[in-house]
Image (spheres, rainbow, N blue to C red):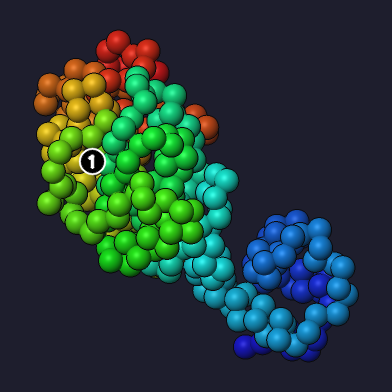
Amino acid sequence: MSLFRTSKNMREIVKIVSKELQITRDEAELVVATLIAQPRFEMYLNEKIDSETVALLNMKLQQLKEGVPIEYITKKVQFLDYQLVIYPGVFIPRLETEYFIELIGKLTTRTPKTILEIGTGCGAIAVSLAHVFPEAQIVATDISPTAIDNASENIRHYNLRDRVTVAQCDLFAGLTGQFDIIVSNPPYVPTSRIPSLPKSVKDFEPILAIDGGYQGVQFIERLVREGKQHVKSHGMMAIEIDEDEVNILRQFLVTNSFRTFVIKKDLFGRFRYLFVGDVKNEKSKNSH
C-alpha cells in the first residue's frame, strides 16, 4: 500500500509520518531526516521531493509500521561519537551502554593493557574502549557469525584492526591467558518477560542476545564463574544487568566467595551495571 500516492512536499510527508506512526511532528521530522540521511534543518530546503525518494520513504515507513527498528532500515546506529554500521539481526546498542563505557573508564584502578569483550554485537563497546584506552589490546568475541562480520566492518572503518581482534566463540571457549578487564552486555531478560517486550525487539532483534534464561541470570552467572580464571588478580569484570536481578546476583556472588563487587545505577536511576574485582574507591561489596 502506498502512503504517498503522488509526489509530496516535505511538510506533507512529515504530517503523514506523524499520523501513521502516531508520533509528534518533531519526532516525525527526526524519523524522516534519519530515513533520508539528511540533517533535520535541511529537510525543508527542497520543497519538491522526487518520485524515487517518495517511493523509498514509502517502503521504509511501511517497514517501521511493521515494527522493524529504524536502525535496521538505515543500517546505521549512533553510539557515543561513533556512527556504526548495524546489520539486521545484530543486537542494537542502547543509551545505557554509553554510560557503561564512561563508568568503566572511571572505575578501573589501572590503565588496562588487555581487554576481553564477550558478545560484541556490532562492536560498539570494543570500538569505544579502544579510544578510551588507546594502549590496550582488545579481543572482541561473539557466538553469531553475522555479529562477527558486523563488528569487523566497524573495526576496519575506525582503523582498529591492529588493536582489536575479533573471534567467533561461545564465552571463553578457545581463549587463553588473562585480561585486565572482561566486559559484557550479555542477555539478561528473563525468558518469561520476552513476550512482553516491544515488537521491534522480540520479533526483529536476536533472541540469543536478549534471553537470559530463568530469572535472567543464567548467562551472567556462567560469565562470572568462568571469568574468574581469565581476569588478572588486579583486574575487573564489568557486566550489564537488569535491576530486578540485583538481589539474586548479590546472593550468587556472596555464595561463590566474590568478596569485592559493586552495583551501579544508570542515568535513569536504575541498577544496571555490575563490577566484580578490583574497582576504584570501592573497599567492599555494596550497591551504591
Is residue 222 found left or right of 261 in the rendered image? left
- Label 1 packing within 10 angstroms: few (<14), some (14-19), many (20+): many
Residue 241's x, y, as percent? Answer: 33, 38
- Looking at the image, how many numbered discs can be counted on the residues? 1
Is residue 175 found left or right of 184 in the rendered image? left
Q: Quadrant of the C terminus?
A: top left
Is residue 189 found left or right of 253 in the rendered image? right
Residue 160's x, y, as percent? Answer: 42, 51
In the foreground, 71 or 254: 71
Q: Quadrant of residue 150?
A: bottom left
Q: Is residue 168 visible?
A: yes
Q: Quadrant of residue 117?
A: top left
Q: Is residue 53 above or below residue 110?
A: below
Residue 194's x, y, as percent? Answer: 33, 56
In the foreground, 3 or 119: 119
Q: Quadrant of residue 239?
A: top left
Q: Residue furthest front?
A: 162
Is residue 167 found left or right of 11 in the rendered image? left
Q: Is residue 100 above or below residue 127?
A: above
Residue name at image x 78 percent, y 89 percent: 6
Badge 1 marks a residue whose secondary structure is helix
Q: Quadrant of the N terminus?
A: bottom right
Q: Is residue 274 visible?
A: no
Residue 159's x, y, as percent? Answer: 46, 54
Identify the residue under disc 1: 220
Disc 1 marks which amino acid? Answer: Ile
In the foreground, 284 or 157: 157
Residue name at image x 33 percent, y 30 percent: 112
Residue name at image x 39 percent, y 23 percent: 107
